[in-house]
Image (cartoon, rainbow, N blue to C red):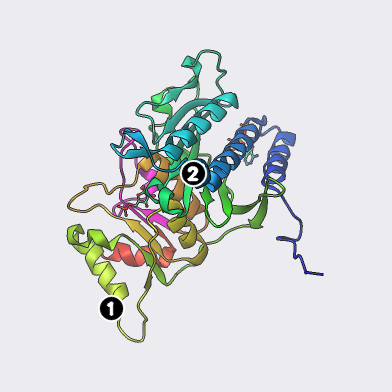
Amino acid sequence: MTEYELPSTDLVTLTTFVLSEGFRLQERNLATGELTLLLNSLQTTCKFIENMVRKARLINLVGAAGNQNVQGEDQKKLDVLSNEIMVKSLVASGQTAVLVSEEDEQPHIVAEIPGASAGKYCVVFDPLDGSSNIDAGVNIGTIFGIYTVREGSTGSIEDVLRPGNEMVAAGYCMYGSSANIVLSTGNGVNGFTLDNAMGEFILTHPNIEIPARGKIYSINEGNSAYYHEPVLKYLESIKYPEAPKKPYSARYIGSMVADVHRTLLYGGIFAYPADKKSKNGKLRLLYEGFPMAYLIEQAGGVATTGTQRVLDVQPQNIHERVPVFLGSKDDVHDLLSFFK
Ligand code: AMP
Ligand code: P6P
């Protein structure tokens, strides 16, 4: 008989994990259950997108949709579908007031949507990050961050033009060899793996803590010609270290969710710096920089723009970009020493 080792001693599903935390708080009158409903709606959305991604090639869902998004990037069919799924399900949850999507120029103000009932949460998200990899079957993912609306607000763009340090939760779902949800609600980071047969995400990575130092650096060195001096000097220090230190290994997938997930589990540093070509780098602040910085910090790591903590940046517009260096605290501190 083949041995089947349970993934964890107590076989906790994401649904149970979120419900029990919510129940614990509700018992103490510290919660109403609204965030629990929102998180479970997000979970269902990720399962739906995972199902689409898994069979995209088989149902001709890959390839260009024939139009461009607000970023001026060619939208893939899966981008469009994932965005529609996400917006519809978050509105239907009845728990959201404002939605910001990488794919939509304007925020969705739920109170202005006919027939929709608004809630108290604002969700900023990239429905399918890494879309340039979709056609090659490489890992892609959904990234989200959650704010509570400001006191007395029924939902406006001002509710999402706030630093990431005001978020109450953040997470991502990576669609790869397995589907993994990594989530934090402000008390550490937990990872869940989808058991397709059960249709449940199972707790497989409780209390993720990023190693203090890693051996991997993750950056698109094709942009080296444009890098500023501090970045070039840092890269030189880890590629040609003084003996007895060993050079770091390079790993770059070009899909933020996959590169950050590996950095979170193995340690090291991921970077998309500002350079002479792009003064704020490429990654978007609200729905890439903030959620990933939130998770990395909650796991004991560091996330900086090179001059300030990513989570402290005050957004000026919902699609602005931000330079990102994130990962193991010792590695990011080494990098920062070249910025001084
Ligand atoms: P609620 O009134 O249910 O929207 O929750 C109020 C606050 O309690 C949320 O903004 C969270 O900070 C926390 N909270 C509520 N439910 C949960 C949960 N299931 N897991 C973690 N934190 C929660
Ligand atoms: P480059 C994907 O398009 C993305 O937004 C992130 O997922 C990824 O980290 C980055 O762009 C890759 O950009 O310029 O290295 O291809």
Q: Relative to 183, does residue 86 appear above or below in the rendering?
A: above
Ranked by sequence position, the earlier of labels 2 and 1 is 2
Pinpoint residue 174: horizontal percent, then vertical percent: 52, 50
Secondary structure of residue under mark 2: strand
Furthest residue in direction bottom, as rendered: 244
Pinpoint residue 81: horizontal percent, then vertical percent: 48, 34
Region in magenta:
302-325
Q: Which residue is mark 2?
A: 142
> Considering only vertical position in the picture, is 225 above or below 214?
above
Q: Identity of the amino acid at label 2?
A: Thr
Residue plotted at (36% across, 86% down):
244
Q: Is residue 301 above or below residue 3?
A: above
Query: Which label number is shown at residue 240?
Result: 1
| Amino acid at circle 1 | Tyr
**Magenta part, dominant SS:** loop
Horizontal side of 121 relative to 133 (left or right) equals right
Q: Residues within 10 Å of mark 2 (few under 14, many from 20)?
A: many
What is the CA distance from the residue labelled 2 to the residue labelled 1? Answer: 36 Å
Left or right: where 51 falls relative to 278: right
x, y percent for residue 236: 25, 72
Q: Is residue 287 visible?
A: yes
